[in-house]
Each structure stands twice: as C-alpha cells, then as structure tokens.
C-alpha cells in the first residue's frame, strides 16, 4: 500500500555528553522515511535549499525504498537547520539555534503521481499546513499526524480543525497533558478521541508508548538500551512513527491489534536510531536485522504464560 510522509529535512548539529556531530542529515521526514523503508516504499514530500549537501542526498538514496521525487530543491533558499545539546540525562536537551530557511516559505506541493497515496503521515509542522497537505490526498484510507507543544499553544484552532479530519494523532505525554489539561495519559487521550481521531498514540520516552483506540487500550514498552548504546536520541520519535506507519501500510490494516503490533515495530526501529548520529545506524541495517531485534523484543516484553 502507498505510504507518503510530509515533514522537514534538516541539517543538524548535535552535541551529547560523549560526542558531537556537525551538519548531519536530520529532520522528521528523513528519520521517518528511513525507518518506514524497511517495510516497503515510502514517498517523501519536503523542501530543501540550495545549500543542502550532496552527501545528504546520497544518504537518502542509499535507502532503496525511499522515493524522493516529491523533494523540492529551492536553489535561492536555505535548508532548515537545527542545533542542540543533550545533558547527562538525555531525556533533556537545549536548543542552541534554529534556522527556519525554507520553512518560512510556502510548503511543497504533493506531486500528481503521489495523490493516490492511501497511508498518510503528516510530520510535525503548523496544523494549517498539515491540513492543506492532507486535502491534496483524496484517496487516503489512513491519515496520522504528529504535533508539538508550540502548535498546541499558538495554533489550537487549526489543530482542532485537523483533528476532525485525521484518523490518528501521535504526541508525547507532556503534550497530551498540555492539550487536554489532564495528567493521566489514558484519560488525556480519551479526551482527544472525542475531538475526532480513531486512535491516539502517547509516547512516554524510555517508558514506551500507550495506544488509546476507540476499541480499547494497549501499551508497548520501550526496548531496553544500555547507557553506552545511546549515542544520540535525535530522531527517535520520528523513527518510531516511520516504523509504525511502514508496518501498517505493509499490513493493509489499521485495527487495534494491527496498530499495537505496529507500535512494537516502531519501537524496534527507533532502538537502532539512537545508536548513532543521524541515519548512520539505519543505513547499515537490513530487514533481517530489524526482524531479529523484533524477536528479541518479543522475548523481553513477554508477560509469560497463564
């Protein structure tokens, strides 16, 4: 089934307590697409500037299932760039700089050949932009969006309009609490369901994720990583979403059991992402590597027999 993602492509500079990486490929669209590519083809819609390095293009091309025909290169513009520093507890980071570049310009259009896409993921950006992109995809059967605290605070009306037209929302527990003024993530997600979506995925970082669906509730733990394995958490959430949507598109289903299984696959792919800066760890993987870690995850997460 056809899967499309819209979002950002960025040039990231990341500092962690153990290492630094300068001007690596980043952005929600990049991480999502790389993760989804293990499950099948993924179509990318994004924009970059004339300063986008050729090496970054080569990274995307190294993933056989990523189609970049929807990637606009704007020679007179600058690529979105972000710099951040993680603390010893890598759940916390500070932003050092943000250069919006092409994000200050009109968003890219969905190419005509992509408009038959059935599975849609709207990466984190202004909800009005997400809604405009969504309406360019009339044959969609499943549409899921990501959001963040900024849009909850400054674009609540547009976010509410978006929720009426999507099937699923992905956000973290702090964002769910902010949006609903409800601390319990399950209760918060139920309030969001009342606004339109069929399901909500609440990410809880190293504590896994909770799925609240109109048909029930499910939970998936995080893959347990040792401290020396966590090189850079950047992109983990986008990789999680890419694995989730990639699995759903390949399965052709979006019922509660299928989404719960998809969350596990997303968790497994994200566990590789954090082992390197940028997409380097994912570049070195095959589907068999992902499947092997999934078997390990199943063993770890088993609750035993009755």
Image (spheres, grey):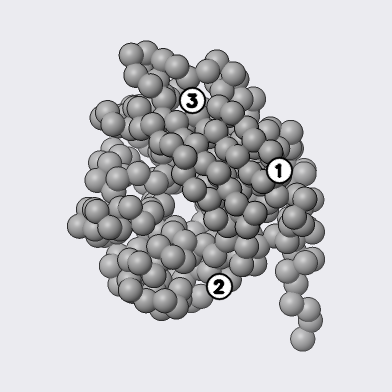
Q: Depth check: 249 or 218 in front? A: 218
Name the element at disc 1.
loop
Mark 1 and mark 3 in contact? Answer it, CB < 8 Å: no
Name the element at disc 2.
strand
Which is more foreground, mark 2 or mark 1? 1
Image quarter of residue 46: top left
Q: Is residue 67 left or right of residue 46?
A: right
Q: Is residue 224 left or right of residue 67?
A: right
Residue 214 shows up from this direction? no
Q: Which mark is residue 68?
A: 3
Residue 171 screen position, x and y as percent? 44, 59
Looking at the image, residue 211 lies above or below residue 162: below
Q: Which residue is mark 1?
A: 18
Q: Depth check: 223 or 104 in front? A: 104
Q: Residue at x 30, y 45 (%)?
A: 126
Which label's residue is closer to the chain start, 1 or 3? 1
Which is more foreground, mark 1 or mark 3? 1
Q: Residue at x 53, y 50 (%)?
A: 93
Looking at the image, residue 11 lies above or below residue 292: above
């Amino acid at each position: 089934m056809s899967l499309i993602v819209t979002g950002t492509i960025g040039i990231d500079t990341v500092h962690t307590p153990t290492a630094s990486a300068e001007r690596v490929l980043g952005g929600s669209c990049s991480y999502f697409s790389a993760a989804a590519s293990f499950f099948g083809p993924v179509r990318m819609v994004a924009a970059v500037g004339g300063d986008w390095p050729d090496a970054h293009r080569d990274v995307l091309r190294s993933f056989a299932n990523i189609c970049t025909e929807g990637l606009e290169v704007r020679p007179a513009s600058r690529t979105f760039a972000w710099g951040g520093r993680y603390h010893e507890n890598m759940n916390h980071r500070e932003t050092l700089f943000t250069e919006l570049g092409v994000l200050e310009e009109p968003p890219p259009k969905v190419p005509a050949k992509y408009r038959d896409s059935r599975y849609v993921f709207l990466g984190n950006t202004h909800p009005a932009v997400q809604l405009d992109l969504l309406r360019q995809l009339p044959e969609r059967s499943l549409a899921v969006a990501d959001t963040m605290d900024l849009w909850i605070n400054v674009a609540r009306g547009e976010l509410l309009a978006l929720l009426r037209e999507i099937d699923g929302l992905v956000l973290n527990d702090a964002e769910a609490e902010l949006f609903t003024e409800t601390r319990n993530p399950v209760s918060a997600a139920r309030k969001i369901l009342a606004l339109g979506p069929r399901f909500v995925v609440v990410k809880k970082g190293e504590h896994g994720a909770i799925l609240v669906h109109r048909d029930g509730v499910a939970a998936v733990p995080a893959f347990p990583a040792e401290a020396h394995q966590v090189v850079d958490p950047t992109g983990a959430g986008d990789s999680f979403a890419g694995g989730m949507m990639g699995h759903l598109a390949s399965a052709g289903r979006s019922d509660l059991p299928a989404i719960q299984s998809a969350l596990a696959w997303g968790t497994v792919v994200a566990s590789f992402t954090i082992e390197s800066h940028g997409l380097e760890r994912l570049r070195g993987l095959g589907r068999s590597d992902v499947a092997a870690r999934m078997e390990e995850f199943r063993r770890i997460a088993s609750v035993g027999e009755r």
